[in-house]
Structure formats: structure tokens, C-alpha cells
Image (spheres, rainbow, N blue to C red):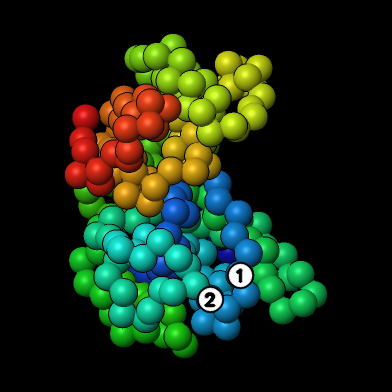
């Protein structure tokens, strides 16, 4: 009997990665993203990913298009996305797949490759982001400064947008979990989400997220994709 690896190791990262272009759907390392798959090309993508040792799919946003129904085959993609591993899979009975991706590691698109069965593929460069895998699955991560300021800005943002939240759960959440969940789930502009994805670490992501909440709560518009902390 062969004892196969049950967790993803760095030497299992693939040289070719299927990508799922979806505006506003941002995955971060150690985050979880549920997806409802129904287009034939993406059904093919999921089936192929399930047969690979890594079970990875790259989530990436298109640069200009915000409507997922209008994404053309050749639409320009951002240079950076995040690879997620399929950790839950369910056939719905009506030709759809319900899956959950667990974020593993960000990647830079080194080269776009020919499509496979309708879905796009890239040659990913994981090298700049190998530290993303250091804290996967670890409950205790280094504390993030500015948590109180973030929660204050978040509360004002939620009030402005009419968003209801479990404040007890938010107060109890570890720093990294709180920051990643807010970045992934809040209804932010795709460019803002991309800027959050590209932050070098959780500390800078928290600072940028705080700035976004403050600007949105005051109605001054959105933060440009080029904003960095």
C-alpha cells in the first residue's frame, strides 16, 4: 500500500494551472470560497482538477469586466490570482457542481497557455508567494496592529451599507481570519479586492482594508487598484 500525501506540499504545486475568471470573487490563502459551477467549460475544469494530485484551481479576476455573464474568452486578466484546493464537492442533481475552495497560495501569471476543453490555463509563478503556505491551518498567527481601528471603520462601513453582522463573532475571531473574511466577503469593488489580494502580508491588508472602509463610509468613492499601504 502507498501512503499518499493528504496535505498539499510545495513540491506538489503544478506547472500548469486552470484559472476561473470571476469578477469580485477573491480568494486568499487560508480562506474558503464556495462556488456554484454550471457552465460546461467550468464543469470540465472541476472534473479535471479533481483528478489531479493537487486539486488546485486558480481564482483570478478580469481587469475591466465586472459582469460575470459578459466575460469573453480573451478578456484581459489581472497578473495575480490565488490557487485554491477543492476541499468540498457535491453534485446537485441538476447538472451543477457545488464546490468549496480552500486558499493555498497566490501566483503570478507567467504565461497564458492554450485552453483545455474550453477553460483557460496559465503557467503560474508561485515563487514570490511561498510564504503564503507557512500558516495554513494554524489557528494562532502573529497579531496584527490596528485591529481596533479596523473594527471601528468596519462598523461605520456596515452601518452605511446596511450590513448586519454578528459582532460577538467578529470580536472573538483571530486577526488573520477576521481580516481575510472581511476582505473576501464584503461587497467591495473588484479593483479594491485586487489591491487587497496583492498586499504583501496581513498587516498591510488590514491597513488597506481600514482605509477602504473609511473612504466607503464617508461616501468619497472607491480606492484605486493602485493604492498600496
Q: Residue at x 33, y 38 (%)?
A: 221
Res. 37 mark: 1
> SS at mark 2?
helix
**Quadrant of the image for the C terminus?**
top left
Q: Which residue is mark 2?
A: 42
189 w.r.t. 173: above or below: below
* x then y, percent, for residue 137: 52, 36
Q: Residue at x 34, y 56 (%)?
A: 81
207 w.r.t. 82: above or below: above
127 relative to 183 in the view: left or right: left
> On the image, which quarter does residue 92 sit in?
bottom right
**What's the CA distance linking mark 2 and mark 1?**
6 Å
Residue 181 or 12: which is nearer the viewer?
181
* x then y, percent, for residue 130: 29, 45
Q: Residue at x 60, y 32 (%)?
A: 163
Q: Earlier in the sequence, mark 2 or mark 1?
A: 1
Q: Answer yes or no: do the residues labelled 2 and 1 have beta carbons within 8 Å?
A: yes
> On the image, which quarter does residue 207 sit in?
top left
**Quadrant of the image for the N terminus?**
bottom right
Q: Is residue 37 visible?
A: yes
> SS at mark 1?
strand
Q: Residue at x 59, y 60 (%)?
A: 35
Residue 83 or 228: which is nearer the viewer?
228
Local crowd size for mark 1, using a 10 Å CA cut-off: few (<14), some (14–19), many (≥20): some
Amino acid at each position: 500500500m502507498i501512503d499518499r500525501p493528504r496535505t498539499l506540499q510545495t513540491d506538489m504545486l503544478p506547472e500548469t494551472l486552470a484559472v476561473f475568471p470571476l469578477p469580485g470573487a477573491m480568494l486568499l490563502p487560508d480562506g474558503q470560497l464556495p462556488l456554484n459551477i454550471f457552465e460546461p467549460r467550468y464543469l470540465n475544469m472541476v472534473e479535471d482538477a479533481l483528478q489531479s494530485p493537487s486539486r488546485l484551481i486558480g481564482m483570478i479576476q478580469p481587469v475591466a469586466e465586472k459582469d460575470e455573464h459578459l466575460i469573453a474568452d480573451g478578456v484581459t486578466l489581472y497578473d495575480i490570482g490565488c490557487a485554491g484546493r477543492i476541499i468540498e464537492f457535491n453534485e446537485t442533481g441538476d447538472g451543477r457542481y457545488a464546490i468549496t475552495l480552500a486558499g493555498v497560495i497566490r501566483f503570478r501569471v507567467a504565461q497564458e497557455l492554450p485552453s483545455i476543453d474550453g477553460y483557460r490555463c496559465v503557467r503560474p509563478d508561485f515563487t514570490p508567494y511561498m510564504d503564503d503556505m507557512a500558516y495554513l491551518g494554524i489557528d494562532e498567527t502573529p497579531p496584527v496592529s490596528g485591529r481596533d481601528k479596523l473594527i471601528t471603520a468596519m462598523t461605520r462601513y456596515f452601518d452605511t451599507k446596511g450590513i448586519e453582522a454578528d459582532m460577538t463573532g467578529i470580536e472573538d475571531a483571530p486577526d488573520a481570519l477576521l481580516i481575510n473574511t472581511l476582505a473576501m466577503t464584503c461587497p467591495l469593488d473588484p479593483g479594491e479586492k485586487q489591491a487587497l489580494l496583492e498586499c504583501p502580508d496581513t498587516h498591510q491588508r488590514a491597513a488597506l482594508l481600514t482605509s477602504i472602509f473609511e473612504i466607503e463610509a464617508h461616501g468619497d468613492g472607491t480606492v484605486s487598484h493602485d493604492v498600496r499601504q
